[in-house]
Image (tube, rainbow, N blue to C red):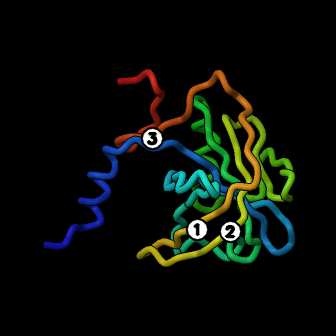
Amino acid sequence: MPVTPEELREVMGRFATGVTIVTTEDKEGKPYGLTVNSFTSVSMTPPLVLVCLDNQLSGLANFKESGRFGVNILAEGQTDLSDFFALAGTDRSQGHYVTGETGVPLLEGVLARMECEIVSLSPGGDHTIVLGEVKGTEVLQPDKGPLLYHGGRYKKLNEA
């Protein structure tokens, strides 16, 4: 019997994830970011990560055209930042962006961040799986905990 999107969302909501803002630039070089929790490490050698982006995302072409992206891992207390980049209609070029060593836009004040070069784009149902080789990493707040998402709510590591 097929699983409905609602059933899958209910079960997946029981899996705690970190919260990231994935960034790239448009063809004019303006930064673009969005909140993503479909992010994972794939390989240590070579260093690979993946993010899954909705095929209906208006900025999907930005990722495909730029060939690179940043992953900004949010710290506890950064729910406002997550909400801003998750809200439909947000001007995603706004934010405290800096330029990474590879030229990709990154966010200031996050827990950690990495710069990636796109290795492949693969179909994944209603999403595109973006595989990236990590070209640079930086931990900005080593003493802070990550922002987590579980059961439709933001959480902290020490919450039950």
Q: Name the spot of residue 5 as percent of width and height, x first.
A: 29, 66
Q: In this view, does 28 lie to the left or right of 39?
A: right
Q: Badges 3 and 2: C-beta atoms under 8 Å apart?
A: no
Q: Position of residue 141 (x, y in %)?
A: 70, 28
Q: For this view, does 2 lie left or right of residue 74? A: left
C-alpha distance separating marks 3 and 2: 26 Å
Which amino acid is tagged 3? Tyr
In front: 107, or 46?
A: 46
Q: Which amino acid does label 2 sit on?
A: Ile
Query: How far apart are the two marked residues, 1 and 2, measured between alpha carbons?
Result: 7 Å
CA separation, marks 1 and 3?
21 Å
**Mark nearer the viewer, 3 or 2:** 2
Q: In what element is the residue under mark 2? A: strand
Q: For residue 135, which quarter of the picture?
A: bottom right
- The quadrant holding residue 49 is bottom right
**Any mark on residue 118, and which?**
2
Does the image show residue 91? no
Residue visible at 59% across and 47% down in the picture: 20
- In the picture as drawn, the residue positioned furthest to the left comes out as 1
Q: Name the residue under label 3.
A: 149
Q: Nearer the viewer, residue 83 or 111?
A: 111
Mark 1 secondary-structure assignment:
strand
The reply to whether residue 72 is visible in this rendering is yes
Q: Which residue is drawn at 42% across and 39% down?
A: 153
Of callouts 1 and 3, the N-terminal one:
1
Q: Determine crowd level at label 3: few under 14, some 14-19, many 20+ residues with C-alpha closer than 10 A.
A: some
Which mark's residue is nearer the viewer, 1 or 3? 1
Label drawn at residue 130: 1
User: Disc 1 vs disc 2: Cβ atoms closer than 8 Å?
Assistant: yes
Q: What residue type is labelled 1?
A: Val
Q: Which of marks 1 and 2 is nearer the N terminus?
A: 2
